[in-house]
Image: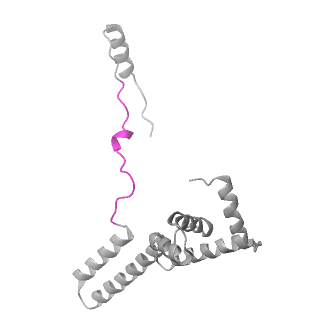
Amino acid sequence: MELSPQKADRLERFRDHLHRDAPLADKDQLLMQRYNFAYTQLCEGESSREVVALLMKVYALSQSQAYNIVNDALAIFGGNPTKAIKEGKKVVYVIRLEELADKLDEEGEYEAAANVLAKAAKLQGMTEKEGQQIDPRLFMPKPNLIFTDDLQAVEITRHIEDAEHDVVD
């Protein structure tokens, strides 16, 4: 999704303010405050819908204005923190499961440890098939079929196929 030139320019001013301390007009500072509020709430684990409801309540905005602020905040600050939070939680769960498996292994509960490690592998995506499966028949050479009722052509192809050749390794 590409941003329109006008929207890209407007968001670029806010990025310049963040990275190079470029001054903002009073109206833009109010918008920047709203962007900061929205992104902070997203980083705290709130969903986009909850942040929109908060923006509508705190700043008395319409729903479309609140959604625009959330989308612009994500564009300015870069990325969706909700995905990063989920990935971080997944890593913590895997580490804890591996620690539990070690503890079970020390206690002699080998089958339970194996089950816990299998769950950790599933969380990491190690049990999923990667990508699209490739059909090995695609790499087989195509047969050279010639359909003809000309007996001379059949005799020529038979002679070519039966010719002496060297096998190269």
Q: Is residue 136 magenta?
A: yes
Q: Is residue 92 left or right of residue 113?
A: right
Q: What is the chief secondary structure element of the magenta stretch?
A: loop
Outermost residue on the right side: it is 23
> What residue is drawn where x is 36% and y is 37%?
140
What segment carries the magenta color?
127-144
* Most foreground residue, 36 or 155: 36
Q: Give the image location of residue 91, x and y in percent.
A: 43, 77
Residue 123 higher or lower than 44, as above or below: above
> What residue is drawn where x is 56% and y is 53%?
1
Q: Give the image location of residue 2, x and y in percent.
A: 60, 53
Residue 10 higher or lower than 139, as above or below: below
Residue 114 higher or lower than 62, as above or below: below
Q: Give the image location of residue 129, x and y in percent.
A: 34, 59
Q: Is residue 125 magenta?
A: no
> What residue is drawn where x is 49% and y is 71%?
52
* Most foreground residue, 51 or 81: 51
> What residue is drawn where x is 60% and y is 76%?
36
Q: Give the image location of residue 32, x and y in percent.
A: 65, 73
Q: Is residue 54 left or right of residue 108?
A: right
